[in-house]
């Protein structure tokens, strides 16, 4: 699907990675390059001014640049020519002085990545806020904890939301930590700044400062660890979104029905089934998450840049790097809608906890017994009781009360207490508080 | 990069997988569905006619359909509504009768896939033609065969081109064999044709016949082996293109210089280095090949469609399936330009064969000796001679002539003959003929 | 995990891809090579006999061969030396005559692949048998069809099993079709059979015939489309297993409970929760399926073999090709256990069909109404009724009977009929019959 | 290939990820758990002592544990039973108290990961040392810089080594930064520490402190961002190794011959070609790098752990996480051998710089001219001169001296100076110094 039309891509991120934005980034590089070179005495100040004045994306026919670039080998070939053509007199001589195509393109991508990360972070903060609300509101709402798709023990929905919150909080921290990775590219044809004499590294630093990017220790045309690191961080975000969306889908199943996307006109319907309320956002979030992860191996495999400039691996990044932003943001936006509008059914949660006739509290009974008769013996007794529950359809409480070995160790009220979910939630509430505290600390750090 | 602007995407294939083409495909499905249902007596003939008349893509606001589809969960929701709105009177009742979103979307993709395969096959035939010309023209042009990037033994350039030819020929056969995979989708909401009474499977067959698609034994909404098989075949094509492009890049290296892309104004230049003639097509072919292969795991991993309709995996295909066509075709088009315009330097091939001082024919000498003194002894003697070649810089012929153990078994002229590349080409020419014959046979089959 | 100890690997397949089996395959190649060369008059018949006699895996220290191979660059270096050392007299001269390492290794893998495919096919036939039984036994057992994890319309469990059956049947056909892909490798150092004079292609054909492998048109050392095609077919099988396992997991959920793995001592327990019966086989099948699919991109990406022998891509296959067999077979074996032992709860299926208060039959009501008042009006009316069902908790039947617009078009008994699952199963039974017929046809073909 | 026999796996890392090591890790967890619970007053001190005493891997039949685990669903089922069986009296009651299988397994993997990272870091430091030596020794050795496989401009070999050094230095820093990621897992069946009352989080912290692992804010059974982050860091290392190996392969090509792996008996030979010295370590490094990267998508895709314990995704990690360590270490060890033994041919570097007749310094001439007549005019003049060099075979110097437009701006000695590689190395030496300084700083930090 074309970007603007795909449900699996964030429209806002599509702006950040539009062809126009890429050309804007290259222009920012060229202007900063000229300023740096003027400052370093390599080119005249006037030339830098003239170049800077021409570095406005409105002056360029962006599609034409890319169309010609597809023939030429890189969009910078027509781009530099067109930029040069827009500058009068001597100043034109100094356009792109000492730079190479990859300097402009890599730096433009880094500027776009910075914008992209800002957008992602803002949205993740909103998701965290929504999860924090859910965690607080449902701090003590019991529900079934499920392992291997089977009801296992009770948890609270607040705990589930708190884990989502902690997961999202960590992602924001992770993205914030990427700033030093976003660094300028500048080295000229083979990374030696050969045409700048001995002022190459100084110029590199000035361009970085001008653009607000980090300074790499060396030009990095064919050492792509930073790109891989950036992509991996996005991949972790995308994977986290997939986890949230997957949980939401499972909670929304007809037979579970514990949480659902809000009903909204024109959304989630079926073209034939009048009753259907499909989980649209979770579905698209899951798909977008996978699509984002699909870019990851492309970028990692493309670390095999050869010698001083790669023939193929670099060009792979031109597609894969934008796409991992687009789809990650697509997943993030869907999860944001999902988390913000989640309709939680606490009654259904409680009802589902009861459908196993108490089996979901077998461990509680087993541990209570274990305190009296030891873990192995208790486990064996309760396991037998569970078999009887399955065979007879009776509740675990009834079976336990009828088991002389169990009643020898525990009285009826102990058994009853052991089988009440509210008494076997462990650190659920404490964990909610921890996750909320972590989130508040993040907010404080970012505001501070 | 947006599709139209990316150097890694075929513009023609971008037409086949445009949003308009997808809507056109869905309209083709709806029209064929109506005709089949009229024929089966499920809906009135007039209704089918009216529906068919409205199934023209020009009548629809394609971007609006996808924009709304991103909210609704699928483009079919607005699509069916808009189609219905374009039909007057009673006939409108019968639009999309008994079908589900996935019926229309899957069938549309299958129609697009058919067009896409046709396009790919046509281009691959052209590549095969170009390779056949190279194989014929250079049937007897000796060059170094290289293993693990080291010169090993002589081959002919004709043989290399013949292997490319055989590889491409096999791909055409492979794509031709995909026809039964391109089948209609029709089952209704859960694949039971419930609203068609007992005429569901008959209608499925009629739609397939109408559209020229194959008939599946059952509806296949969540059994995606066919999609995976289709993607795999494209992946093999893409991988084959990567192999060809990689060979071309290595041949074009400055230090090898045996073949290069033709020089053309405005192509392959560098923004700073006046002498550069970059291998543009090979570079983009390699990148496009990798991008195509990057879609493969997405599609295979998305075979985990759950129950009767997937929440996520199916939507992954909406992006990944078009993209594997787009990038495979991108690679194919670049390889076509490459193979058609390849400038072969037979002199350089011959010169490179000589730079090892005859080492590249060490096996020839060893095998000639082996006929006299056995393989192990001969191997050991010649291995020693090779060490001396490396140490002294002398030619292998000189070293061999100075080695009494070698000259005890072989006279000077035998040694000289053994070290002439033309005498150690084995079945090179015969293989060229085989590959050409295989190609001719394919052409004959396709024309016949 | 080491192969023998991993729950995600088939132990039988681990035998097929053991180091011993690989050496056995290389020995089979060397023996067949010697026989072919004797037949072609290249080496003495006695030598071929002596070589053949030494080609017994018991004579070799297999771990030592691989250990030295890790230093030497390929196991064939020590392997050929050790084989030569086991042959007395002149015959030793003729070991590995005219062959290269890759000839022996690729051919050995092809022999192993043949054994591996046989094993897989046998197990898939057993799975098909189990699915056929399920399909037959539950031809008319209604259950909820689920799309996007929501109950949509009724199907039968027989239909679900029939779709599994058709999917598995197609895989067997697909694997059977791979036979021509399993071909001998023989070309010598650069694929020219240089040391065999003009008898190279003839020898290649003889070796293939001897080993029962197909004859390639040319040696294929660096054209790896066949390997990719083989891997893709395995990947499709693995993906199919993932689909089945995923469905089984969802059916076994506590809240769904429609089918489960049989209870067996020491299986599926939890280390702490006495009541747990975890879905062991489905879990491992899903994991093994993903692991198999993880090898696919490695193999496809490794199609970039350069020139006449690859430095890296080929060696990737040494790990990835066995692993895709091991994990695919791991998934297949788990699904076999799963399908053979599946405990189906038809009552629970029926009960689950009722939990929506009839919403799952909304389409049925809508289509019935549509026959009277047209699809759009009917859809709108029933959609409103569904909203009321959700708001009031009443059944759809009750709501419909209370809706004057609906009762104006349909009488009470029509409404009742429309809301009985048994009346809205469409072609479910017919599809079961089709899938069974397809399976029977496959059995007939294979036996015939 | 079995781990111990594969050339693509580090034998030392195979020890770290052996089944024994995994059981040892689980035992370390159980012992630390018991100590923590004793300290927290949950179980008796004596019990903790008895449990601790039994936690010795020699006491266990490791293969039997995994064999049974393959049936049971996890190795912890037999493991806990066997551990319990080794403890006499009451203490046996307290084994594994309040823990779940995943607590033991995840924590064991984290301990193994810690050992694995230590091993990797030690080897990377050695690689960095070797690169530092190369960078220093060849600080001023000119060679051709190559972009898109074409000679572009001169660099020094010291610069190339310095870029490798900086790349490897960054990886060490990156792995060092992973320490907070290596954290304990402890939460019990659904992550609530239900059977520990309110002391669950305290116990979690004590276990972490005991084992020297980090404390997570919450148990993280189904939030796998840390695992993905760990895998990504390994992937970046693997990718970096692939880059180095790829450069080495290209430098070792017969036609380039600028650097090669040292000759060593029994290594790099061909089974048929006596002269071959194959690049064994680079080849295996490249293959191992790709294999490591192949695990990355498995791990990222497996972030879709559902609810409180995953059925499938988690089990994928059991294979994929060890393998990414094994193959990354395999690549690292090969690159270490490669970098330590690299034989550099400075003469050949100089000779290769001359094969273009000076074209490789076209930019230098262009920039020198540009200072007089502006960049666009200079570029055009020199581009024409380059065409003449290609057409006539004359050197660029000769062509430039014969061009009146060029000689109007530059005298002969300026032209000569512009065409001397030593005068156009830019910041090469300065960059070498920077990379060395960065490496020294890292060493100082780590020692300090």
Image (cartoon, coloured by chain):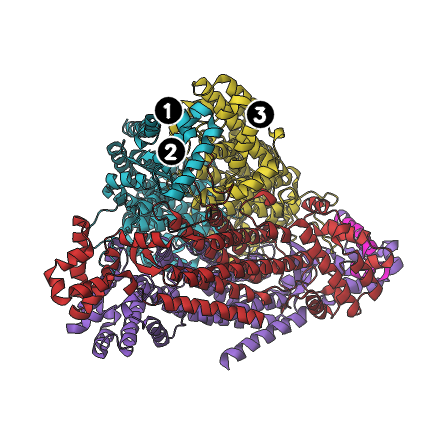
Chain colours: A yellow, B red, C purple, D cyan
Q: Are marks 2 and 3 in contact (CB under 8 Å)?
A: no
Q: Secondary structure at mark 2?
A: loop
| Residue at the spot of label 2 | D402
Q: Secondary structure at mark 1?
A: loop
**Camera-nearest residue between A35 and C197:** C197
Is residue B30 visible in this depiction of the protein?
A: yes
Read off the chain for label 3: A
Is residue A373 visible in this depiction of the protein?
A: no
| Residue at the spot of label 1 | A197
Q: Which-is-in-front pick, marks 1 and 2?
A: 2
In space, the residues marked 1 and 2 are separated at their CA atoms by 27 Å
Q: Residue at x 11, y 65 (%)?
A: B408
**Camera-nearest residue between B297 and B400:** B400
Label placed on residue A54: 3
Task: Look at the magenta stretch and give its main secondary structure.
Answer: helix
Q: Is residue D363 left or right of residue D277?
A: right
As drawn, A382 above or below D396: below
């Amino acid at each position: 699907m074309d970007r603007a039309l795909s449900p699996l891509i964030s429209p806002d991120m599509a702006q950040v990675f539009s062809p126009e934005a890429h050309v804007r980034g290259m222009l920012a590089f060229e202007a900063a390059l000229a300023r740096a070179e003027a400052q370093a005495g390599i080119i005249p100040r006037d030339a830098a001014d003239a170049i800077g004045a021409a570095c406005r994306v409105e002056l360029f026919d962006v599609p034409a640049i890319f169309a010609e670039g597809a023939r030429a080998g890189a969009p910078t070939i027509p781009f530099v020519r067109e930029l040069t053509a827009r500058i009068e007199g001597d100043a034109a001589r100094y356009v792109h002085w000492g730079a190479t195509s990859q300097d402009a393109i890599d730096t433009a991508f880094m500027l776009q990545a910075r914008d992209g990360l800002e957008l992602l972070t803002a949205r993740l903060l909103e998701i965290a806020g929504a999860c924090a609300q859910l965690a607080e509101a449902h701090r003590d709402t019991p529900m079934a904890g499920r392992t291997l798709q089977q009801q296992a023990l009770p948890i609270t929905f607040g705990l589930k939301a708190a884990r989502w919150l902690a997961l999202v909080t960590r992602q924001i921290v992770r993205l914030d930590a990427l700033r030093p990775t976003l660094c300028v590219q500048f080295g000229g044809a083979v990374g030696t700044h050969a045409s700048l004499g001995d002022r190459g590294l100084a110029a590199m630093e000035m361009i970085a400062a001008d653009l607000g990017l980090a300074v790499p220790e060396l030009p990095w045309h064919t050492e792509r660890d930073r790109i891989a690191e950036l992509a991996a961080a996005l991949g972790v975000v995308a994977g986290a979104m997939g986890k949230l969306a997957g949980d939401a889908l499972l909670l929304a199943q007809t037979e579970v029905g514990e949480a659902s996307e809000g009903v909204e006109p024109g959304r989630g319907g079926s073209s034939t089934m009048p009753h259907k309320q499909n989980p649209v956002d979770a579905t698209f979030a899951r798909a977008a998450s996978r699509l984002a992860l699909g870019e990851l191996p492309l970028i990692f495999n493309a670390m095999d840049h050869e010698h001083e400039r790669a023939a193929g691996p670099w060009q792979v990044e031109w597609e894969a790097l934008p796409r991992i932003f687009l789809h990650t943001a697509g997943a993030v936006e869907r999860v944001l809608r999902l988390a913000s509008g989640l309709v939680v059914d606490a009654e259904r949660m409680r009802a589902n906890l009861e459908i196993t006739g108490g089996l979901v509290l077998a461990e509680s009974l087993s541990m209570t017994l274990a305190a009296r008769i030891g873990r192995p013996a208790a486990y064996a007794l309760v396991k037998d009781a569970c078999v009887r529950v399955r065979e007879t359809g009776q509740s675990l409480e009834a079976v336990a009360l009828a088991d002389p070995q169990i009643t020898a160790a525990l009285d009826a009220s102990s058994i009853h207490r052991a089988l009440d979910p509210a008494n076997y939630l462990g650190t659920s509430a404490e964990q909610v508080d921890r996750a909320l505290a972590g989130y508040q600390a993040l907010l404080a750090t970012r505001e501070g």
